[in-house]
Image: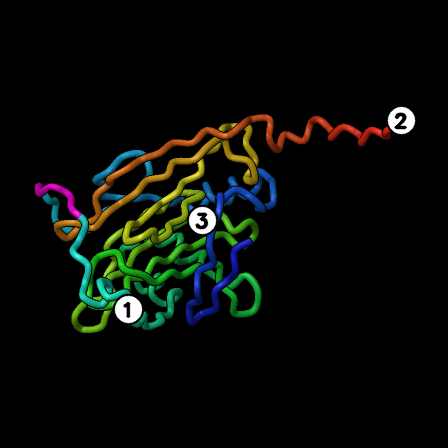
């Protein structure tokens, strides 16, 4: 189960498959549809992502690690107010910002990760926004710190059941795929897309589609009763 982040942002926990542990029910999917999320200016298809920055024609290459990374010394990651960052971002969908409210007390359904993605002078910030009831991702954003200390949005994916992570300098975005009869807890599959920063933008470098066993989680068949050993 994902942890909730307060108004000041928080540290992201490791994530496995998005669907596991979520409360099953079709009402969450209806709520996601009502959010009316959209993405404009997409440069890659299939995941609803929006890549920011000028289009590049150069061959994709991993950014040269900084001297701090080369010596194995992690650079300090200044913490940010992830909720304020999303709410003040003009590139975030208005309906999503309006629906971003505390689930309980001052706890917001927001996960925040810090790490090296763009090779900037400070750690980049990955923010995942979720629903309160089922903690289903509805928006993934990457913020890069500018020279003046402000943060700029360099990546956005605003689709239901999306979640982004940092994996050894790459951005990995997982999107659950649902069929018409799927519950929130048991999607039909998932798309896992890897992005790498090059020439001032994120470029897709790998895509994996996983199809899940339809028998898992159907709940139609009871487990067999344990057999008693007979002498």
Q: What secondary structure is marked by label 2?
A: loop
- Classify 10 Å Cα crowding around label 1: few (below 14), some (14-19), many (20 and above): few
Question: Dot 1 corresponds to which residue?
Answer: 73
Q: Quadrant of residue 88?
A: bottom left
**137 with respect to 208 (left or right):** right
| Whole-number angstrom distance, CA of label 1 to CA of label 3 | 32 Å
Circle 3: is it few (<14), some (14-19), or many (20+) Cα within 10 Å? many
Regarding mark 3 in the picture, which secondary structure is present there? strand
Q: Is residue 224 magenta?
A: no
Do residues under tags 2 and 3 come within 8 Å of each other at their CB atoms? no
Q: Which residue is mark 3?
A: 137
Q: Position of residue 87 (x, y in %)?
A: 36, 63
Q: Which residue is the site of mark 2?
A: 230
Q: Secondary structure at mark 1?
A: loop
Q: Nearer the viewer, mark 2 or mark 3?
A: 2
Can you give x and y, in whole percent of width and height, for residue 31 in the image?
A: 51, 45
Residue 93 seen? no
Q: From which residue to which does the magenta span run?
A: 57-61
Q: Are marks 2 and 1 in contact (CB under 8 Å)?
A: no
Q: In terms of depth relative to the viewer, which is nearer, 64 or 77?
A: 64
In the image, is residue 201 above or below residue 113? above
């Amino acid at each position: 189960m994902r942890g909730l982040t307060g108004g000041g942002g928080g540290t992201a926990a490791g994530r496995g498959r998005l669907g596991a542990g979520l409360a099953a029910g079709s009402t969450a999917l209806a709520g996601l549809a009502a959010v009316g999320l959209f993405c404009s200016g997409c440069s890659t298809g299939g995941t609803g992502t929006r890549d920011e920055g000028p289009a590049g024609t150069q061959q994709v290459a991993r950014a040269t690690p900084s001297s701090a990374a080369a010596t194995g010394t992690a650079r300090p990651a200044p913490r940010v107010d992830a909720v304020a960052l999303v709410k003040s971002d003009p590139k975030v969908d208005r309906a999503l910002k309006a629906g971003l409210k505390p689930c309980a007390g001052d706890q917001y359904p927001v996960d925040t990760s810090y790490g090296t993605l763009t090779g900037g002078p400070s750690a980049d910030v990955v923010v995942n926004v979720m629903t309160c009831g089922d903690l289903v991702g509805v928006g993934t954003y990457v913020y890069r710190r500018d020279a003046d200390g402000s943060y700029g949005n360099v990546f956005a994916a605003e689709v239901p059941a999306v979640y982004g992570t940092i994996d050894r300098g790459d951005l990995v975005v997982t999107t659950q795929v649902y069929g018409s009869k799927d519950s929130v807890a048991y999607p039909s599959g998932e798309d896992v897309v890897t992005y790498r920063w090059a020439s001032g933008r994120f470029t897709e470098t790998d895509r994996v589609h996983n199809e899940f066993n339809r028998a898992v989680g159907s709940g139609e068949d009871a487990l067999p009763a344990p057999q008693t050993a007979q002498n």
